Amino acid sequence: MTLFIKDIQCSDMRYQQCCNLDALNVTHQVNDRDIKVFKRIFSLDSVVMNRLYHKQMHLETMARLLDKYPELRRGFGMVIYTKTQTHNTFFDDEWLGEIASECGIPHWRYFTLSMNHCASGLSAVNLACRMDDNGYQFPVIILSGEKSFSASFNRMPVGLLGELSTACLLSPEDGVWEIKDTQVEHVHRYYKNQDEMTQQERSELRTLFFEELNRFLAQFLGANKTPDIVIPYNLNMPLLKRLAQARGWTSVIDLSQISCMGHLWCSDIFHHLSLKKNEPSHQTVMAFSAGMGITLSAISLVKSH
């Protein structure tokens, strides 16, 4: 059985703004020294922000996707919202059900997938593929993106997080990309918040993180052909450059979105894929993401038409 990425809808640019780092002193609590570090070491120039509230941001994206495929409203499907741990305070709010109703799909199943941190987006693709393999064939919409509520969540030692909603439509019938392979792996070791780590613990984590990600991708690529392009998640430019060097990807990895977009939680890969769907030179794609925990996710795609 085969599953396809049929379409990816991103936030309307009318609601998006690329903010220079010096405009993030309140939302991300960055000072002049921080800005110099993020620019010089992590090649970060701006972060995209969305002026809509959480529910409205995702409603706008979902509604535009379903307006393009109105026939979906007549059938059955599933919506998976992928998140980190930021929105646990919304557990008593029916915002996802309200979005489904307002978009005309209240009869669809919908739920959130969490605890994989920023690898949750590709983990949801893996879940949808496993369901498809077991005979559960129906369209799936993976909804991703979060709001930057406070610097406790949206500022990391290796990057800054932005706001952009994406709705990725998976179809068992046809699409732009055929999903050839997916993989999710959990490294069996728990890490506390990096702010509470000792210097030695941080050093051990950096070493283990690179080694495990490098091993995971080598194993995944061993089962798949070398792609035309490699799309990483938008975080930690030095790590990604080191990884590209180790894997021999310096000519195929695309790091172009990191400097202008920031890290978009689980939306990184979907947003980047939406930019590549009309480029004929990119017939095969491998994308990957990683989240603290540690969770590693990867996907292999082939252009279907």
Image (tube, helix red, strand yellow):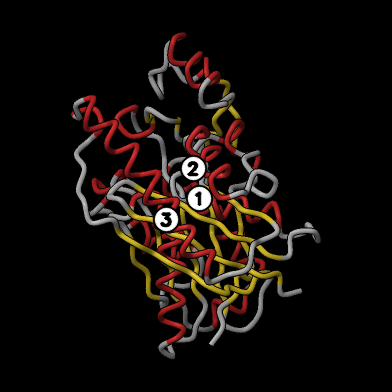
Spot occupied by residue 262 in the image (x, y as percentages of width and height) = 52, 34
Spot occupied by residue 60 in the image (x, y as percentages of width and height) = 55, 52
Q: Nearer the viewer, mark 2 or mark 3?
A: 3
Q: CA distance from mark 3 to mark 1?
A: 24 Å
Residues packed near mark 3 inside 10 Å, few (<14), some (14 to 19) or many (20 plus)? few
Vertical relation: 41 (above or below) 162: above
Q: Nearer the viewer, mark 3 or mark 1?
A: 3
Q: Give the residue pinned by disc 3.
A: 215
Q: Is residue 51 left or right of residue 257?
A: left
Q: Give the residue pinned by disc 2.
A: 264
Vertical relation: 3 (above or below) 233: below
Q: Amino acid at mark 3?
A: Arg
Q: Quadrant of the C terminus?
A: bottom right
Residues packed near mark 1 inside 10 Å, few (<14), some (14 to 19) or many (20 plus)? many
Q: Residue at the spot x=61%, y=53% of the render?
A: 230
Spot occupied by residue 210 in the image (x, y as percentages of width and height) = 40, 44
Q: Residue at the spot x=38%, y=29% of the render?
A: 155
The mark total stands at 3
Q: Which label's residue is closer to the chain start, 3 or 1?
A: 3
Q: Amino acid at mark 2?
A: Leu
Q: Nearer the viewer, residue 159 or 61?
A: 159
Secondary structure found at label 2: loop
Residues packed near mark 2 inside 10 Å, few (<14), some (14 to 19) or many (20 plus)? many
Secondary structure found at label 1: loop
